[in-house]
Image: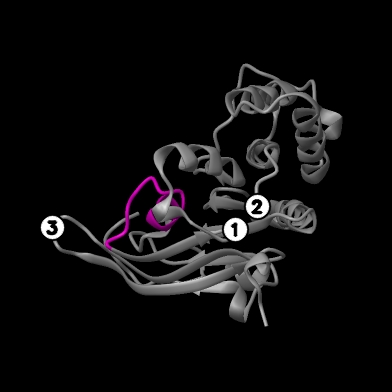
């Protein structure tokens, strides 16, 4: 039997209706375990990015419950939510890096922005580089990284705060298929490092090609939002 500690995200009976009355989600439920990578698959306008915004509580659902690392994020006060957001890493599409800074500079900028200092910052910095395979690229400017490198840096930025879970919005999109396995290997390393991962994609064949089947996939129906 699963305990609360085993679950990174629990979405229960989630509903979202737009102001003009269009239902995007109706009783959506799924679980992401702490040792798991799960894909959310759906066509354009099915609500994939919206789902991530709901988990980040950038948007409020019409109804339902979202637990992240055992906490009901919909009940957190603004002050507690700000602090708790450190436990959720996020990679948007397109991935955001600071091109004028080095790989190390990007990570230190994020750590300072989160108020993480001292030993915790050093540990987060080194762990992020190790998990993403960027330890040998500390002094490389972000603008000089190839498309895979930029995604790895975006992942490193997302994990440097040692979150419980990382949300990746269409991270494989526009990446040459020959590099998909390399990116998935990095995601597996992050998962093995104790961080659960939720990935959105509009490519229904991607999870199968990368070895994620059955319970590793959440399917969304065609909807009205990107």
What residue is rendered at 58% in x and 59% in y?
198
Is residue 112 shown above or below 53? above
Relative placement, left or right, of 178 versus 170 is right
Image quadrant where residue 135 sits? top right
Q: Which residue is mark 2?
A: 164
Relative placement, left or right, of 46 versus 104 is left
The residue mark sitting in front, 3 or 2, is: 2
Is residue 142 shown above or below 18? above
Q: CA distance from mark 2 to mark 1?
A: 7 Å
Relative placement, left or right, of 18 versus 65 is left
Q: Tell me whether the residue at label 2 lies in contact with that at label 1, contact meaning CB atoms closer than 8 angstroms.
A: yes
Identify the mark nearer the N-term, 3 or 2.
3
The residue mark sitting in front, 1 or 3, is: 1
The residue mark sitting in front, 2 or 1, is: 1
Task: Indicate the secondary structure of the residue bearing disc 3.
Answer: loop
Q: Tell me whether the residue at label 1 lies in contact with that at label 3, contact meaning CB atoms closer than 8 angstroms.
A: no
Q: Which residue is mark 3?
A: 20
Q: Name the one closer to the observer, 128 or 92.
A: 128
User: Which mark, by number, is residue 69?
Assistant: 1
What residue is rendered at 81% in x and 34% in y?
123
Identify the mark nearer the N-term, 1 or 3.
3
Residue interval drawn in magenta: 50-62
Identify the image quadrant of the N terminus.
Answer: bottom right
Q: Residues within 10 Å of mark 2 (few under 14, many from 20)?
A: many
Q: CA distance from mark 1 to mark 3?
A: 33 Å
Is residue 31 shown above or below 17? below
Question: Can you give x and y, in whole percent of width and height, for residue 171 in the image?
Answer: 57, 50
């Amino acid at each position: 039997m699963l305990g609360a500690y085993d679950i990174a995200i629990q979405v229960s009976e989630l509903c979202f209706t737009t102001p003009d009355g269009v239902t995007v989600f109706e009783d959506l439920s799924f679980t992401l375990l702490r040792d798991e990578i799960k894909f959310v698959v759906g066509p354009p306008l099915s609500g994939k990015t919206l789902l991530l915004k709901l988990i980040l509580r950038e948007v409020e659902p019409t109804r339902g419950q979202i637990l992240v690392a055992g906490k009901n994020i919909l009940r957190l006060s603004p002050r507690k939510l700000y602090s708790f957001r450190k436990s959720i890493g996020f990679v948007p599409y397109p991935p955001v890096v600071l091109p004028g800074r080095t790989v190390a500079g990007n990570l230190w900028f994020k750590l300072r922005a989160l108020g993480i200092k001292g030993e915790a910052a050093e540990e987060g910095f080194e762990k992020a580089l190790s998990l993403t395979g960027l330890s040998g690229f500390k002094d490389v400017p972000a603008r000089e990284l190839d498309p895979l490198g930029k995604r790895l840096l975006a992942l490193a930025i997302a994990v440097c705060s040692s979150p419980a879970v990382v949300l990746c919005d269409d991270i494989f999109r526009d990446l040459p298929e020959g590099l998909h396995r390399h990116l998935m290997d990095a995601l597996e390393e992050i998962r093995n490092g104790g961080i659960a991962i939720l990935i959105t994609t509009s490519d229904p064949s991607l999870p199968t090609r990368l070895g994620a089947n059955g319970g590793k996939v959440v399917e969304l129906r065609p909807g009205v939002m990107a």
